[in-house]
Image (tube, coloured by chain):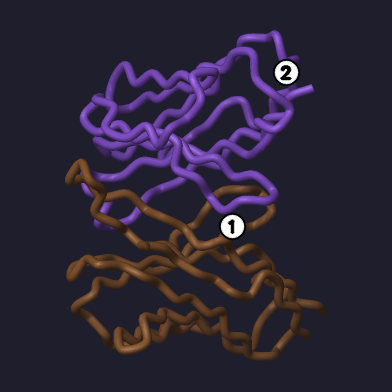
């Protein structure tokens, strides 16, 4: 596979559930990102990992917990979410600095009930 | 403030019309990078173009063209002879230098383009 792959594509979870979103890139990039896209807000940067080290947090609530075990994989662990967390979660990757832009996955459409 | 503004929330045109999507940015950086992305209904953001702050040449790629003007801090995108397949949300983005010394993309709110047959 090439590009950035996100799984699952769709996820419905209750507020007491624990779930994880997965992102995988095969582009040889060394930085990965989580963005949140909700209906009423522009794309919001959640987390940045560069060389597997988290460098940006952007004040995301602790119910979102990222994990980057290596430069090709990125996870977003979810627990005790709220209905307002329902959104499209996009993963992206780039070379460090992102000067040449990002490559995005197709996203996970999350619905919290 | 460093940000990207796309004032047009939604545009509807009829096929074969030309359409221009506006993008205005603010940054204190002297070196920066601007991008346009297309988001079709499938959700994935597709890269269209990158421009650095030192290159003000306009660019044309098929039916797409971009007009970068530093004097007005604008990076507008024109689609000539629009087609139904151009229907999507288009995002303008700016690569900003964060306090950590790293760059990250900040996006405008997007413009939804609907091309009617």
- For disc 2, the marked residue is A13
| Residue occupying the point 17% across, 46% down | B101
The structure residue drawn at horizontal position 46% and vertical position 28%, both measured from the top left corner, is: A23
Q: Position of residue B56 (x, y in %)?
A: 26, 85
Percent x, y for residue A93? Answer: 36, 41
- The answer to whether dots 2 and 1 both sit on one chain is no
Q: Quadrant location of the N terminus of chain A?
A: top left
**What's the distance in space between the residues labelled 2 and 1, CA to CA?**
25 Å
Q: Which residue is mark 1?
A: B39
Residue B28 placement, left or right of B3: left
Colour that chain B carries in the picture: brown
Q: Numbered disc 1: what chain?
A: B
Helix, strand or loop at disc 1? Answer: strand
Q: Is residue B69 above or below residue A69?
A: below
Residue at left 24%, top 33%?
A: A50
Residue lying at the far front in this picture: please name it: B1
Pick the front one: B7 or A98:
B7
Q: How crowded is the residue under tag 1: few (<14 C-alpha within 10 Å), some, or many (20+)? A: many
Q: Position of residue A3 (x, y in %)?
A: 42, 41
Residue A35, image x and y in percent? 49, 40
Q: Secondary structure at mark 2?
A: strand
Q: Camera-side residue: B67 or B22?
A: B22
Q: Quadrant of residue A87?
A: top right
Q: Residue at x 57, y 26 (%)?
A: A7
Residue nearest the observer in this picture, B62 or B111: B111
């Amino acid at each position: 596979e090439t590009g950035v792959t996100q799984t699952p594509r769709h996820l419905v979870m209750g507020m007491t559930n624990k779930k994880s979103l997965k992102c995988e890139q095969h582009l040889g990039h060394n930085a990965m990102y989580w963005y949140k896209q909700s209906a009423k807000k522009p794309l919001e940067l959640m987390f940045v990992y560069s060389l597997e080290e988290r460098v940006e947090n952007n004040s995301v609530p602790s119910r979102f917990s990222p994990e980057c075990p290596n430069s090709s994989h990125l996870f977003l662990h979810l627990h005790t979410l709220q209905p307002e967390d329902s959104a499209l979660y996009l993963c992206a990757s780039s070379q460090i600095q992102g000067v040449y832009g990002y490559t995005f996955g197709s996203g996970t459409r999350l619905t919290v009930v | 403030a460093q940000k990207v503004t796309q004032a047009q929330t939604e545009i509807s045109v009829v096929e074969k019309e030309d359409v221009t999507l506006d993008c205005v940015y603010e940054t204190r950086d002297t070196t920066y990078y601007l991008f346009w992305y297309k988001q079709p209904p499938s959700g994935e953001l597709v890269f269209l173009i990158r421009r650095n702050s030192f290159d003000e040449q306009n660019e044309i790629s098929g039916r797409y063209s971009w007009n970068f003007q530093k004097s007005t801090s604008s990076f507008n995108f024109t689609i000539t002879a629009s087609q139904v397949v151009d229907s999507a949300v288009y995002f303008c983005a700016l690569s900003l230098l964060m306090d950590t010394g790293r760059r990250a993309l900040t996006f405008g709110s997007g413009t939804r383009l609907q091309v009617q047959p």
